[in-house]
Image (spheres, helix red, strand yellow):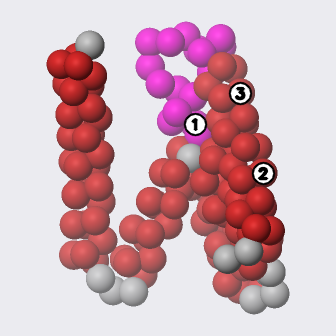
């Protein structure tokens, strides 16, 4: 991969990350910090966005790899990786691998939450 695709992903990721931060700040100000409304909104909007883009790219077949890298990997990847996780799960399900899709979802959630718990414990042990 040349430098140009990496740059597209980096710029898109920066834009997505800034958008995610903005949504979280706005949600905190409007709805309070008692529930992660911003993260929920980002995950739902990101899921809708990746579904829409992946569907349009698949149906039209004329989207360049440059556009895919910038929008899906970059912008939406920076906005929320949950959208990529969701697309992977749906792709498995649509291929008829329902059991594998369920396993992927369960293992991803359990291991990801477990990793956060382990990381927090490690930080406390080191600190």
Q: Residue at x 52, y 51 (%)?
A: 81
The answer to which of marks 2 and 1 sits earlier in the sequence is 2
Camera-side mark, 3 or 1: 3
Q: Is the C terminus in the top left, top right, bottom left or bottom right quadrant?
A: top left
Q: Please provide percent x and percent y for residue 112.
A: 29, 46
Cβ–Cβ below 8 Å for labels 3 and 1? no
* Label 3 vs 1, first from the N-terminus: 3
Is residue 13 shown above or below 42?
below
Q: Between marks 2 and 3, how big is the CA–CA gap?
A: 17 Å
Percent from the top left, x then y, of residue 25? 66, 19
Answer with left or right where residue 88 lies relative to residue 127.
right
Which residue: 63% across, 47% down?
Answer: 78
What span is colored magenta in the figure?
27-42
Residue 75 in view? no
Q: Give the structural element (helix, strand or loop) at label 1.
A: helix
Q: Nearer the viewer, residue 85 or 12?
A: 12
**Eyeballing the image, is 44 above or below 9?**
above
Helix, strand or loop at label 2? It is helix
**In the image, what residue occupies the spot 69% across and 49% down?**
13
Q: Nearer the viewer, residue 28 or 31?
A: 28
Q: Residues within 10 Å of mark 2 (few under 14, many from 20)?
A: some
The residue tagged 3 is 22
User: Dominant secondary structure of the magenta stretch?
Assistant: helix
Q: Position of residue 94 (x, y in %)?
A: 42, 81
Q: CA distance from mark 3 to mark 1?
A: 11 Å
Residue sitting at 37 percent across and 77 percent down?
93
Q: Which residue is mark 1?
A: 41
Viewer-nearest of discs 2 and 3: 2
Q: Is 32 one of the magenta-colored residues?
A: yes
Side of 120 relative to 125 (left or right)? right
Which numbered dot is residue 11? 2
On the rendered structure, is 84 left or right of 56?
Answer: left
């Amino acid at each position: 991969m040349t430098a140009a695709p990496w740059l597209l992903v980096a710029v898109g990721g920066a834009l997505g990350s800034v958008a995610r931060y903005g949504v979280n700040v706005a949600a905190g100000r409007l709805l309070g910090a008692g529930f992660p409304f911003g993260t929920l909104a980002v995950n739902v909007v990101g899921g809708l966005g990746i579904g829409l883009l992946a569907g349009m790219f698949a149906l039209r077949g004329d989207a360049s790899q440059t556009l895919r890298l910038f929008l899906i990997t970059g912008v939406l990847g920076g906005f929320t990786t949950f959208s990529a996780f969701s697309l992977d799960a749906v792709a498995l399900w649509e291929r008829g691998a329902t059991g594998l899709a369920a396993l992927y979802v369960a293992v991803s959630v359990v291991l990801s939450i477990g990793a956060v718990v382990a990381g927090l414990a490690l930080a406390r042990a080191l600190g």
